[in-house]
């Protein structure tokens, strides 16, 4: 039977794979991805700034950073790898680092409340 740690270690990368897939689809879509607007509408400007900050390139960079953090946890649950998260050494389940990485995905299917930090 899979442990809480095993489930989080497999579930979280699957969420990142989905984020990457969506970002790459947008980049590859006809017309690509760009924002160009001149307006004095402050709501529209705020929406444009938000979209610009959460561009596909940003999403891909964030996915890569999160994957590298996950890579620091090869022994989550085993606590024996020399290059692992310092929190994992004495924590009885998935450390808070992994729980925090999973938190933005709490609204997705498969998220378990026991992962909430």
Image (cartoon, helix red, strand yellow):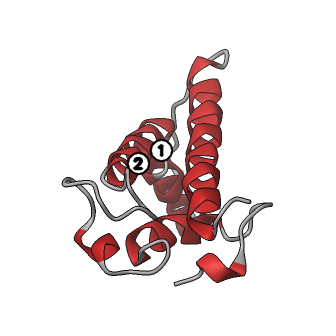
**Is 75 rendered above or below residue 90?**
above
Residue at x-position 50% and y-position 37%: 56
Tag 2, which secondary structure? Answer: helix
Horizontal and vertical percent for residue 11?
64, 53
- Judge from the rendering whether residue 56 lies leftward or rightward of residue 89; answer left or right: right
According to the image, label 1 marks what residue?
Answer: 59
Horizontal and vertical percent for residue 6?
59, 58
Q: Are marks 1 and 2 in contact (CB under 8 Å)?
A: yes
Please state which of residues 21 and 17 is positioned toward the viewer in this rendering: 17
Please state which of residues 76 and 27 is positioned toward the viewer in this rendering: 76
Residue at x-position 73% and y-position 69%: 107
Residue at x-position 69% and y-position 59%: 2
Residue 85: which quarter of the image?
Answer: bottom left
Would you call the spot at circle 1 few (<14 residues within 10 Å), some (14-19), or many (20 or more)?
some
Q: CA distance from mark 1 to mark 2?
A: 5 Å
**Is 62 rendered above or below residue 106?**
above
Residue 21: which quarter of the image?
Answer: top right
Residue 75: which quarter of the image?
Answer: bottom left
Q: Which mark is residue 18?
A: none
- Judge from the rendering whether residue 100 lies leftward or rightward of residue 91; answer left or right: right
**Is 8 rendered above or below residue 116?**
above
According to the image, label 2 marks what residue?
Answer: 62
Tag 1, which secondary structure? Answer: helix
């Amino acid at each position: 039977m899979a442990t809480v740690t095993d489930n989080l270690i497999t579930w979280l990368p699957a969420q990142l794979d989905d984020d990457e897939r969506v970002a790459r689809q947008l980049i590859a879509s006809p017309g690509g991805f760009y924002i160009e607007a001149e307006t004095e509408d402050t709501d529209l400007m705020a929406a444009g700034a938000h979209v610009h900050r959460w561009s596909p390139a940003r999403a891909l960079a964030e996915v890569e950073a999160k994957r590298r953090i996950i890579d620091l946890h090869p022994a989550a649950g085993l606590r024996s790898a020399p290059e692992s998260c310092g929190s994992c050494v004495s924590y009885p389940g998935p450390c808070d680092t992994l729980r925090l990485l999973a938190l933005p995905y709490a609204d997705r299917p498969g998220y378990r409340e026991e992962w909430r930090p």
